[in-house]
Image: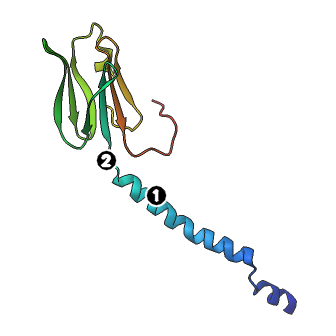
Amino acid sequence: MDNLKRDLGRLTVLDVLLIAALLALPGWALIRAARAAGERPIARIFQNNRLVGTYQLDRDQTIAIGDRAGPEMSIEVRGGAIRVAESDCPKGVCKHAGWVRTPGRTIVCIPNRVLIEVRGASRDYDAESY
């Protein structure tokens, strides 16, 4: 019994490394979460494969995309999300995409050749299912 107590009281190098790793893991997770929270999501809008602009999603605004004859699309940014409010495309599929706020999600309008891409802090998952 005395030998068992003596052996249990002695820490090996592996024990110390394991304890250090277990203590460092929560700190690493907190630092990673704080860094991700600091990244503000943005939306990048492209038309004809050219960047029209980069917009902060935390600023409410309306963006008109189109040619000189008049706007083809009205894009709305509100409450940390973006959507196509109005579009003169035939079926209006881009309007049905609704509000997009998750980084990695996109809205595409093929007739107007517009792509809206949300970027920012990445999520811990690969896909969303509705």
Query: Label 2, label 1: how many angstroms apart (C-alpha)?
Result: 15 Å
Is residue 99 shown to the viewer in this render?
no
Is residue 57 shown to the viewer in this render?
yes
Q: Residue at x 45, y 44 (%)?
A: 123
Q: Residue furthest front?
A: 50
Direction from residue 20 to residue 85 in the image, left or right:
left
- Inspect the image, locate mark 1, and give the three-letter code of the amino acid beneath it: Arg
Q: Residue at x 74, y 82 (%)?
A: 11
N-terminal-most mark, 2 or 1: 1
Nearer to the camera, 55 or 106: 55
- Residue 110 lies, in percent from the top left, at 35, 14
Q: Is residue 129 above or below residue 38?
A: above
Q: Is residue 54 above or below residue 114?
A: below
Direction from residue 118 to residue 127 in the image, left or right:
right
Q: Are marks 2 and 1 in contact (CB under 8 Å)?
A: no
Q: Secondary structure at mark 2?
A: loop
Circle 2 residues within 10 Å: few <14, some 14–19, many ≥20: few
| Residue identified by numbered label 1 | 32
Q: Is residue 119 above or below residue 92?
A: below
- Colour pattern: rainbow
| Residue identified by numbered label 2 | 40
Q: Is residue 32 above or below residue 6?
A: above
- Inspect the image, locate mark 2, and give the three-letter code of the amino acid beneath it: Arg
Q: Residue furthest bottom?
A: 2
Q: Quadrant of residue 5?
A: bottom right
Q: Secondary structure at mark 1?
A: helix
User: In which quadrant of the rendered image does the C terminus lie?
Assistant: top left
